[in-house]
Image: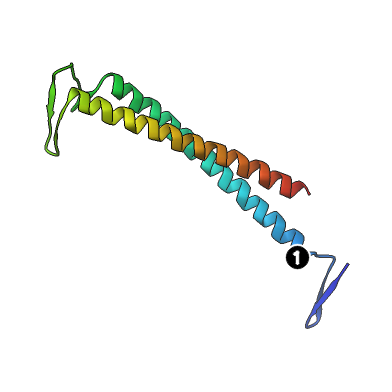
Amino acid sequence: MSAIRAGSSAITGVDMSDTKQTSAASKAIGLGIAAFLIGLIFIGASFLAGEDAENPRCDGQLMSKGDVCYSSRSTNGYESRADSARTASTWLLRLGGIAAVGGVVLVVGGAATRSD
């Protein structure tokens, strides 16, 4: 046990390294939970984008092969829209998986540090 005197008051039995370690573990757990939830959102969005790859839409209307979508931003054909949705789905799934796994690692690491 250590004693720290500051003026007339004294703090005894407080090991500041334990407090800092617990605080870091709590932050890791909080960040891990947030990363995991964000990963799940990205994974869910990837499934929605995958559905758009199977059934491309233009202003909410289903497109058929050979259709062209004219919008204020661009002009895209059926295949172009399907390819864009497939690419988005793939990247969202990858990023979501990385974030979810990273979140689990942070939570487990923070919990292990906290219990030491």
Q: Quadrant of residue 57?
A: top left
Residue with the most extreme top position: 64
On the image, the x and y values in percent for residue 13 come to 85, 65
- The residue shown at (39%, 35%) is 91
* Residue nearer the viewer, 16 or 52: 52
Viewed as shown, does residue 39 lie left or right of 59? right
- The residue shown at (86%, 70%) is 2
On the image, the x and y values in percent for residue 14 come to 80, 65
Residue with the most extreme bottom position: 7
Indicate how the structure is coloured in the image: rainbow
Q: Name the amino acid type tagged 1.
A: Met
Q: Quadrant of residue 109?
A: top right
Viewed as shown, does residue 38 lie left or right of 104? left
- Secondary structure under the numbered disc 1 in the rendered image: helix
Viewed as shown, does residue 4 lie left or right of 74? right
The crowding category of the residue bearing disc 1, from other C-alpha atoms within 10 Å (few below 14, some 14 to 19, many at least 20), is few
Residue 41: tell me if it is visible. no
Residue 34: tell me if it is visible. yes
- The residue shown at (30%, 19%) is 54
Residue with the most extreme right position: 1
On the image, the x and y values in percent for residue 93 come to 43, 32
On the image, the x and y values in percent for residue 99 come to 50, 40
Q: Which residue is mark 1?
A: 16
- The residue shown at (53%, 38%) is 36
The image quadrant where one finds the N terminus is bottom right
Q: How many marks?
A: 1
